[in-house]
Image: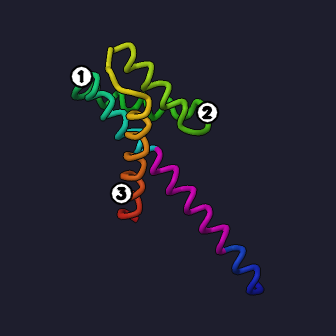
Amino acid sequence: MSGLDDREKGFENKYAHDQEIEFKATARRNKLLGLWAAAQMGIEGEAAAEYAKSVIVADFEEAGDEDVFRKIRKDFDEKGVDLSDHLLRKQMDELLAKARKEIRSEG
C-alpha cells in the first residue's frame, strides 16, 4: 500500500471508531437520562430501570435527540413535572458529556 492508501485507511478506521464511541455514549446518556427522568417523576427501582429502557428505545424513532426529548417532555407533562424545556435539554447535554467521558475512560 502506498502512504496515501495507509493514511486514507487510518482516517476511515478513526471515523468508524469515533462513530462507535458516539453511539455507545448516546445509548449510555439515554439510560442515565431515563433514570434521572424517572426520579423526577417519582419512579423507583425496577420501574425506573424499565423507564430508562423505554428512553433508549425511543431514540430509535428518528435521527437526533428530538425523539428522546419529546418522550420525556410528554411524560413530564403527564406526570405534572414542572421543568422547562431549556433545563431538560441542558440535562441531556450534561449527561451526554458525562457518558462520553465514561466511555472514553473505559476504552
Q: Are marks 3 and 2 in contact (CB under 8 Å)?
A: no
- Tag shown at residue 102: 3
Give 76 or 18, whichever is nearer the viewer: 76
Asked where in the image residue 32 lies, by quadrant, the reply is: top left
Give the labeled residue for mark 1: 42
Q: How is the image coloured?
A: rainbow
Q: Are marks 3 and 1 in contact (CB under 8 Å)?
A: no
Q: Could you tell me which secondary element the residue under label 1 belongs to?
A: loop
Q: Amino acid at mark 1?
A: Gly
Q: Amino acid at mark 2?
A: Glu
Which of disc 1 and disc 2 is earlier in sequence? 1
Give the labeled residue for mark 2: 62
Q: Position of residue 26 (x, y in %)?
A: 47, 46
Q: Position of residue 16 (x, y in %)?
A: 61, 61
Which of disc 1 and disc 3 is earlier in sequence? 1
Which of disc 2 and disc 3 is earlier in sequence? 2
Q: Amino acid at mark 3?
A: Glu
Disc 3 from disc 2: Cα separation: 25 Å
State whether residue 59 is above or below residue 96.
Answer: above
Q: Residue at x 37, y 45 (%)?
A: 95
The answer to if 100 sits in the magenta stretch is no
Boundaries of the magenta span: 10-26
